[in-house]
Amino acid sequence: MRLTILGGGGFRVPLVYGALVGSEITELTLYDTDPLRLGVIRSVLDGLPPGPRVRVAEGLDDALRGADFVFSAIRVGGTAGRVQDERLPLAEGVLGQETVGAGGVLYGLRTVPVALHIAERVAAVAPDAWVINFTNPAGTVTEAMASVLGDRVIGICDSPVGLVRRAARAAGADPDSVSYDYVGLNHLGWLRSLTAPDGRDLLPGLLADSTALGSFEEGKLFGAEWLRALGSLPNEYLHYYYFRRETLAAVRAADETRGEFLDHQQGEFFARAAEHPDRAHALWESTRLEREETYMADSRAATGGWQRDSCDLDGGGYDRVALALMRAIASGGGTRLILNVRNGSTVPALPADAIVETVCEVDSRGARPVPCAPLGEAELGLMLQLKAVERATVEAAVFKDRDAALRALALHPLVDSPAVAGRILASVSAEA
């Protein structure tokens, strides 16, 4: 099988390559608009165990032609764009974050047109390929690409699988043996059951055990009292919604935003690795570890400050999900994964073509959401509001519609005023 990675100069590409060692992928094609970054990543791959043959494409169509699977892992505007997405909202007193709040809307506005162009080229030169979307904001971007590719584009994220594995370990179960009910949107979902092989739901016992809840990331972020009140385990990104005052204060008090940290860190890494290609892999590994250690540092600071568990620092997750997804489609063997796919009738209050993040059955026909229990009013309300934001973001990006962009920003729960939304839009125009 042939795999193409768009954004082949991206920092996480070596994790994907490592997961492919010994797999059915025989050729990996990399494409990136930044030749320096692409060259550095090639040097990093040289330091890993031999995997599939690596080819560098001359252009987008060249990269796509003949591919069985296409990973879309692009960052439009680079880390400098992320810095702007974070700083402009913070200047107005609202959260700036890569995928959440006004920052996520700004990133989506910039990314959707490029993602749609990719989808159109896939449809033209590789119509049989499956597109696996890594590009953030994953729900918004997958929804835009699905308007061209239908069910042949599937979005993935490592947050849900990480939550399931951490919760299973805290409940004393083997993470590979449990089944689960998870539903929501990307970076806005809830784990609502965790079922052992003997059919017992382990979640009620876990929620009742304050010590167990305090042993893993989501328990520390949200606290036992709130988790018991919810009756579920939220995705870590819901901390921005449930504790918006605390997280905003922590972000504003930090010396730099996450985007600024990554901009400096990655800039230094790529410069040093380009100068010393023989040390590229070692430099990448130390940079990756620092990146994982500092992940969601603001939210951890807002809850008293604590270090991530060592088992969450390997940086894996989404790469393994992607490999399992490809294998299930290629072999036809069924598996269950949490993915971003078209809703169908999973959440009746949402349109059938809306992208949701939920448990799916995967085989040679692709990924199909499995039935789930009805959502509570609070969870459904958040989903409906955020889906309106995502759809307005796509509309604004496609049609260059300022009214839709204003709706996308002003309707977001973390933006507290249409006047604020208007000033953020004006600031983006001034920066352009």
Image (spheres, rainbow, N blue to C red):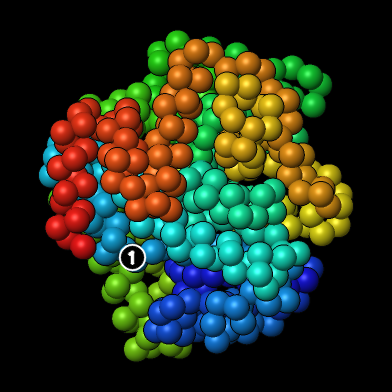
Above or below, 82 relative to 38: above
User: Which of the two residues, 321 or 134, is positioned nearer the viewer here?
Assistant: 134
Q: On the picture, is 350 further left or further right than 420?
A: right
Image quadrant where one finds the C terminus:
bottom left
Q: Quadrant of residue 46?
A: bottom right
Q: Position of residue 95 (x, y in %)?
A: 24, 38
Label 1 CA crowd tier, 10 Å (few <14, some 14–19, many 20+): few
Q: Residue at x 45, y 39 (%)?
A: 391
Q: Which residue is mark 1?
A: 77
Classify residue 277 as left or right of residue 129.
left
Q: Residue at x 79, y 54 (%)?
A: 329
Q: Is residue 179 visible?
A: no
Q: Residue at x 44, y 78 (%)?
A: 33
Residue 410 x/y as whole percent: 27, 33
Q: Amino acid at mark 1?
A: Gly
Task: Tell me where residue 125 appears, x and y as whole percent.
Answer: 67, 73
